[in-house]
Amino acid sequence: MKLATRINSYLRIDGYNLEKTFSDFYDVGLNYVDLNYPEHVINYSKEEMKALLSKYQLTLNGVALRFRGDFINGELGNADPQIADKALNLCKEAVDYCRYLGGNVITIWLGFDGFDYSFQINYSKVWNQLVRAYQEICDYAPDLKISIEYKPYEERAYAFVDSMGITGMLLQEVNRENIGVTLDYCHMLMKHENPSFAADIFGSRRKLYGIHLNDGYGVADDGLMIGSASPFKTLEFLYYLKKHHYDGVIYFDTFPVIEPAAHEAQQNLEMIQYMNKLIDSVGMEEIQKVIDSNDAIEAHQLMMKFFKMNIH
């Protein structure tokens, strides 16, 4: 299993830098890393970062764009053409950095492309602008996976790319082989989506490029430990990842504040391994039979079965 966790959960701790963080990853048993660009790479050349990853036997999964400063009124969809071009060029820089380090995925979350008020943006203009921008990024990096991460709100009251439906429409209009989606479990709960619905639809179309796993209560991006708030939804979600042979990295996008970051990552690791054993013990075919029965009683009996299982 390819696993990574959130670097910023460690960097907030006194005395931590990127090397100390990578050392903790190695100790816990994580094997992949996702870097925020340019946030995590400012003080490291490509050569230095490559050596640091190698030292702790970590593989770069990919690079996630982080837009700050000039982009608070929009990134690729910004109404100012110069700022939109700056966002596009930042994506291309991230592609170059990722490619040098052997990564596979460029994750683009447009936290500021959205609106707060009625009559504030030209929706069709922003839509067309995003389609063209994603096409240009895909064409610039045909050897990499360009992945759209959606979220319904935060940083803006309304995000432009807010749901599985809008993301699916974007994939269709961008119309490139290397465009896909990163599913964030908490983001889907915030949108009142069932995470498994998106995993099945995008997974069946081989467009599932990234997984951010966490948990929450559906109002905010809580970033709780895996399986802590909605364990059965998490089990179903993992079932669909297995069904569609997802072979990418599962990234623990959890936010320990009071909890020690390394211990919290260990709990996430143990929970996902335990849940995978539960699924394997019941069996993929048996679970599919329950789903195909379209019977709430049988589904509830399956959940009871998971409760009663004793896995070692």
Image: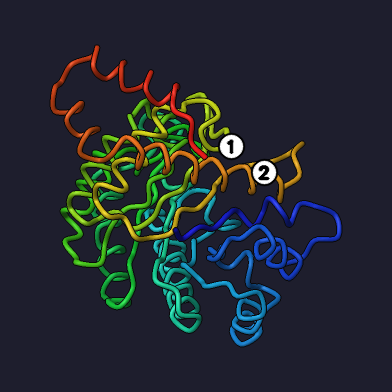
- Answer left or right for 123 relative to 3: left
- The residue under the point 41% across, 65% down is 106
Closer-to-camera residue (286/227): 286
Label number found at residue 245:
none
Please name the residue that numbered disc 2 is placed on: 264
- Answer left or right for 209 relative to 255: left
Picture quadrant of residue 292: top left
Circles 1 and 2: CB atoms closer than 8 Å: yes
Tell me residue 11's x, y (percent). Answer: 73, 57
- The residue under the point 51% across, 37% down is 154
Residue 257 vertical placement versus 16 (above, below): above
Q: Is label 2 in a helix, a strand or a loop?
A: helix
Picture quadrant of residue 288: top left
How far apart in space, not on screen, are marks 1 and 2 (Cα)? 7 Å
- Among the two numbered marks 1 and 2 on one chain, the one whose residue lies closer to the N terminus: 1
Name the residue at the bottom extreme. Answer: 47
**How many dots with numbers?**
2
Amino acid type, residue under disc 1 in the picture: Met
Residue 160 vertical placement versus 85 (above, below): above
Closer-to-camera residue (113/140): 140
- The residue under the point 21% across, 56% down is 206
Tell me residue 53's x, y (percent). Answer: 61, 76
Specify the quadrant that holds the N terminus.
bottom left
Please name the residue that numbered disc 1 is placed on: 225
Colouring: rainbow
Q: Is label 1 in a helix, a strand or a loop?
A: loop
Amino acid type, residue under disc 2 in the picture: Glu
